[in-house]
Amino acid sequence: MNLPNQLALFRILLAPLMLLFFIERDLPIFEGWHPTWLDYFAALIFVIASVTDFFDGFIARRWNQMTKLGAILDPLADKMLVLAAFLGLMYLDRADGWAVFLILSREFFITGLRVVAVSEGINVAASFAGKAKTVIQMIAIGFLTMQWMFGDILLWIAVAITLYSGWEYTRDYFKVANK
């Protein structure tokens, strides 16, 4: 169990903790807490998880510690974090249900396509749009969590980039698969 895999596992554990701060606001442990503090803690957990996402990939590449387990854990942790954030934000009525549905549908579809690609020995690298999608989703989640202006606009920008990057990934897969 190398450091990148440990960071991915840590991120997997942070996802339900963040969701707890979003949807279990009536728990006795939160009695007397102002809802804003629950938002702050959810945002802090999200930032910590996002930072570990950067570092697990960086360390794995830099120290040549890429493993099959890491290839499974890293995207799983990413999806769990995004799922927890968007479900929590939808629960709090801060994220549009259609936007969340479109983003999560794309994520599940591309995850399935990646499984197929790996089983066929096809490597389709993440594109610039895929990396931009992740950054815009993270920014949108932060803005929506903190209830800052333009969070809803950022969410729809994230939807557009998410769908575009999904189309790009699908197109690239079929280019390679049909050779």
Image (spheres, rainbow, N blue to C red):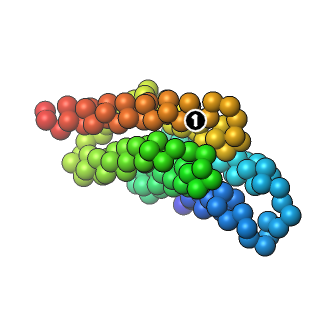
Q: Left or right: 113 with respect to 56? A: left
Percent x, y of residue 63: 55, 42
Name the residue: 56% across, 30% down. 153
Percent x, y of residue 57: 53, 42
Q: Left or right: 32 with respect to 6? A: right
| Amino acid on which the number 1 mark rests in the picture | Asp
Q: Quadrant of residue 18?
A: bottom right
Q: Can see residue 110? A: yes
- Farthest top residue in view: 128
Percent x, y of residue 124: 31, 37
- Farthest right residue in view: 32
Name the residue: 37% across, 48% down. 105
Q: In the depicted view, which residue is nearer to us: 110 or 26?
A: 26
Q: In the rendered view, would you say 104 is above or below 21?
A: above
Q: Left or right: 98 with respect to 123? A: right
Percent x, y of residue 85: 58, 51
Name the residue: 20% across, 36% down. 174
Q: In the depicted view, which residue is nearer to us: 16 or 131?
A: 16
Packing grade of label 1 (10 A; few <14, some 14-19, many >=20) is some
Q: In the rendered view, would you say 177 is above or below 20?
A: above
Residue annotated with mark 1: 152
Q: In the rendered view, would you say 89 is above or below 23?
A: above
- Farthest left residue in view: 179
Q: In the rendered view, would you say 47 is above or below 152?
A: below
Q: How many marks?
A: 1
Q: Can see residue 81? A: no
- Element marked by disc 1: helix
- Farthest bottom residue in view: 28
Name the residue: 50% across, 29% down. 157
Give the quarter of the figure containing the N terminus: bottom right
Q: Quadrant of residue 179?
A: top left
